[in-house]
Amino acid sequence: MSDNYYSKSEITVNVISHNINIDQAGIYSIEYQAIDGSGNKSGIISRTVYVQYPPNCMNTFLNNENLNLSDAVSVKPNPTTGNITVAYALNNNEPMTITVMNAVGAQMTERVVGGGFGEAQFDLSNFGNGMYLVRMTNNGQSTVKKVIVKD
């Protein structure tokens, strides 16, 4: 962070909102804003935060063996005008297949991404307004998230 007048120590960062739980692996978000000594404010910044268990940690409170795929992925924003981001924090390095289907189950697009942490962007604006289903399949598990596209 930089300012053309104030030093880093004179700039404050205010957290607007967050849903981060460091005790539970998953994908979270935080919104914050920087304010300088004159009261000038930055825009509100939104960031994705990935919380992951140590790999293959067994017999501890950090065990990731039973992490549910539905809790390891998120699709946002929802509703959207077309662009969505599928964020994932998988507890394995197996590839994940992301399939976008229309409301009657016809496949609109599909992509295979690597395991671990990441994001995949999709543009649904060319498919028209309506409800879409985003199916994610990884390591023998599947989950489906609904997304609404509207102008």
Image (cartoon, rainbow, N blue to C red):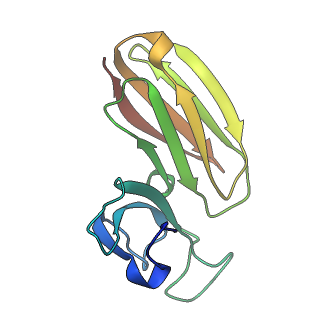
Q: Quadrant of residue 12?
A: bottom left
Q: Nearer the viewer, residue 78 or 111?
A: 78
Q: Quadrant of residue 55?
A: bottom right
Query: Which residue is found at the position 70% from the left and 36% from the top?
Result: 112
Query: Which residue is found at the position 34% from the left and 63% from the top?
Result: 33
Q: Is residue 67 visible?
A: no
Q: Is residue 132 above or below residue 45?
A: above
Q: Picture coordinates of residue 116 (x, y %)?
A: 67, 59
Q: Picture coordinates of residue 127 (x, y %)?
A: 47, 11
Q: Nearer the viewer, residue 4 or 137?
A: 4
Q: Is residue 61 above or below residue 55?
A: below
Which residue is at the far front? Answer: 5
Q: Nearer the viewer, residue 108 or 125?
A: 125
Q: Picture coordinates of residue 41 (x, y %)?
A: 31, 61
Query: Which residue is found at the position 48% from the left and 58% from the top?
Result: 48
Q: Is residue 74 above or below residue 92?
A: above
Q: Is residue 130 visible?
A: yes
In what quadrant of the picture does the C terminus appear? top left
Count up the numbered dots.
Answer: 0
